[in-house]
Amino acid sequence: MPYNTLKYKIKNNIAYIILNRPERFNSFDMQLGKELYDVLKKITPDDKIRAVVIKGTGKGFCGGGDVKEMHLAKDKSKFIRELTRDRIHKCVIEIRNMEKPVIAAVNGAAFGAGLSLALACDIIISVKDAKFGTAFIGIGLAPGCGTQFFTKITGYQKACEYILTSKVFTAEKAKELGLVNKIVEEKELDQAVEEFTQKFRKLPPIAVGKAKMLINKSLENNMLDHLELESKTAAFSAGSQDFREGVSAFVEKRKPEFKGK
């Protein structure tokens, strides 16, 4: 289907999603939420896709929920409920559940739901001049997403400091807090992203996907349950052609060629 709020392409086994509402800093309206979810649902079962990149057009990565659309909504409570539950949350859940690495290429402002979208991704690469903030409190709104991700990464006191005061912070501070993996100059962003995607083109996608799943499950499992899940998952991946190729290449002292099977 054609998309009006984003651009989507697959190149060399990598899916690229470009949020495309630059006049609104790529903020979430109902349509963007619907279209982003539609794209993510297509990507999840596609075994040819090794990784996903999400980026914004223009000066913003994602400015959060579209405040203008909120203002125009007659029933604001109903609107926010639908925007968070039926749009933004579905995208966040799909990103976390898909067994493919997702990279947020933060090319500019990431506020509110935009910060939450970035934090849902597995790797965040940011331009040096990007600004971050949870934003919700600043417009009189309780956070509709992102508090769990932010708190688990930064800890309780830091989460309170930044969320309760709607504090805006720099890319350097985001990296210091553990929210961002790497900071680059604006002209270097695409190359930095490609350095990661090139790794995922060569790594075994089944093992990478299952490792992502295990990392997510580790945040909620107790130790004994998680050790059992690790054992079962390792056994599952050991039945793949990629594992046979990996151990053969190791013994034969050559580079493996993984096929995702």
Image (spheres, rainbow, N blue to C red):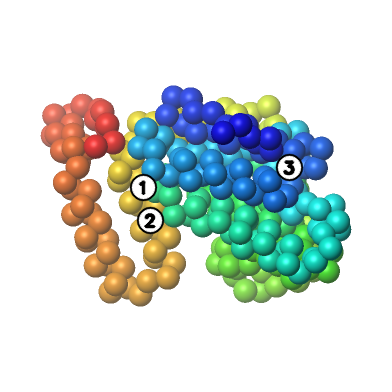
Q: Are marks 1 and 3 in contact (CB under 8 Å)?
A: no
Question: CA–CA distance between discs 2 and 1?
Answer: 6 Å
Q: Is residue 100 left or right of residue 153?
A: left
* Callout 2 amino acid: Met
Residue drawn at point x = 35 percent, y = 75 percent: 222
Residue 209 — which label?
1
Q: Nearer the viewer, residue 238 or 174?
A: 238
The numbered mark, 2 or 3, whose residue comes first in the sequence reads 3
Q: Which residue was labeled with disc 2?
A: 213
What residue is rendered at 27% in x and 31% in y?
A: 259
Q: Residue at x 64, y 49 (%)?
A: 33
Residue 232 seen by the camera: yes
Give the residue type that dot 1 points to.
Gly
The residues tagged by marks 2 and 3 sit, at their Cα atoms, a distance apart of: 29 Å
Q: Quadrant of residue 16?
A: top right
Between 138 and 172, the residue placed more toward the observer is: 138
Is 240 on the left or on the right of 144, as rendered? left
Q: Is residue 14 above or below residue 233?
A: above
Which type of secondary structure does the marked residue at label 2 adopt? helix
- Give the alpha-carbon distance from disc 1 to disc 3, as whole Å: 28 Å
The residue pinned by badge 3 equals 26
Identify the element where label 3 is drawn.
Answer: loop
Q: Marks 2 and 1: CB-CB under 8 Å?
A: yes
